[in-house]
Amino acid sequence: MATVNPLLQQIDAIAKEKGVEPEIIISAVQDALEAAARKRYKSEALRARFNTDTGQLELYAVKKIVEDVTDPSTQISLTEAHELYGDEAEVDMEIEFPRPTEDLGRIAAQTAKQVIFQKVREAERENVYAEYSQRVGEVVNGMVKRFENGDIIVELGRVEAQLPRKEQSRAENYTVSDRVRAVIRGVNRSAKGPQIVLSRTDPALLIKLFEQEVPEIYDGTVMIRGAVREAGDRAKVAVYSRERDVDPVGACVGMKGTRVQSIIRELRGEKIDIVEWSEDPILFVTNAISPAKVQRVSIVDDGERVMEVIVEDKQLSLAIGKKGQNVRLAAKLTGWKIDIKSEEEKRREVEIQLGALEIGEPAAEEAGEGEPAAAEDVAAEDATPQATAADDEAQAVAGGDDAQADDVTKPPVEPPADDEK
């Protein structure tokens, strides 16, 4: 039985460990031998070759056949080539002359080692990029390995990934060896550290979790038409059913809220509002303001996509949400700028406008206290005790102890009447 060359065995072992092809390791070894030999044979053109039959590395000095020799270290005359190889030698052919490798020395060996490591590392990184660049948006499971300046290094099998601080939810804390599920945000080809970037705040994670938990979404019966998040606090998901007999919101909530509750636990208690998507923008905005009850909705500016939403006085703080969170998420989900007003505010605004018309003065200058509460300017509305109490009610929407997700996540509003659209 023929013995296997030790160098071949080592090349195969490294190739399996690093997940690269043996040919890449062989090429790296050849490049390393050439780099090391240049310190010994400085002026010669060198070529290394791995002999697969003997398992030995061979080194050659390459000389080109020319008519007139100008550089003896890299060229050989046609006459001399004829003496060595007969009439077969022709101009521009290359002749290889063997060179010994035993006397290269310790420094040359160290150089060869560095070249091999560099080539193998580059091959590893190319393999990681080729594999994971096709998996962007996919949810992966990993284990927390270490922390670097606030970033979490996650081990994904044989490769490492980075969970940057800005992609971490503020409601989550991890320790070494904790299991973590995250979505692949991107893959960097030239990064020095881990190439794979993960995220726990991307809405894609929420969508993938729903696909895993809700069979109707996985098979395409129910479609997710949009998802927005403020990681650690609240999220809104717009769903749509392709079959009339299937309730999209009920399918996502599950029996007694089991499906949505499992997603809430995975996101460490993040509240989730599941609303029904509609082609009618007024109905969609009405649903998106959930859990607040809407009195009426009207389009202020179709071109600028601005809507005015009127709610009951006691529903105002609930519609706005904590620091404007509810209306801000609704605006992101629907793509409309939403101005929320209470019935009392709207009544005062109308009275001022009527009064201004009666005395012939512009109403716009005196309507200051009736300014709309836009999605960007609603934080101050939440400062009153009424807003705090109403917000506590809103926090029970998707995960409260006393409220079933079945009852709360469905939009508790009726579609606006035809004359209001």
Image (tube, rainbow, N blue to C red):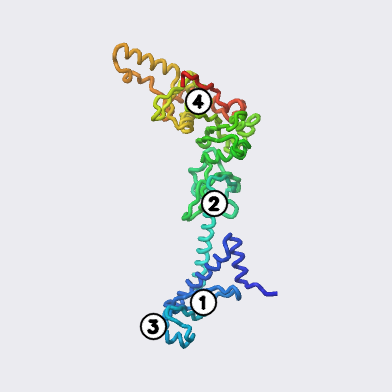
Q: Type of residue at label 3?
A: Glu
- Callout 4: few (<14), some (14-19), or many (20+) C-alpha neighbours within 10 Å? some
Q: Nearer the viewer, mark 1 or mark 3?
A: 3
Tell which circle, 1 or 3, labels the residue nearer the N-terminal end. Answer: 1
Query: What separation in Å lies between label 4 and label 2 (alpha carbons)?
Result: 40 Å
Left or right: residue 176 versus residue 228 is right
Return the residue at label 3.
67
Residue denoted by label 4: 283
The residue that appears at 48% across and 52% down in the rendered structure is: 188
Please name the residue shown 55% across and 38% down the image. 207
Residue at the limit of the structure toward the left, as seen here: 360
Of the pair 306 and 273, the residue shown nearer to us: 306
User: In the image shown, does 317 or 295 lie closer to the viewer?
Assistant: 295
As shown in the figure, which amino acid type bears the numbered disc 2?
Answer: Tyr
| Labelled pair 4, 2 in contact (Cβ < 8 Å) | no
Q: Residue at x 61, y 62 (%)?
A: 16
Residue 9: % across, % down: 62, 69
Q: Nearer the viewer, mark 3 or mark 2?
A: 3
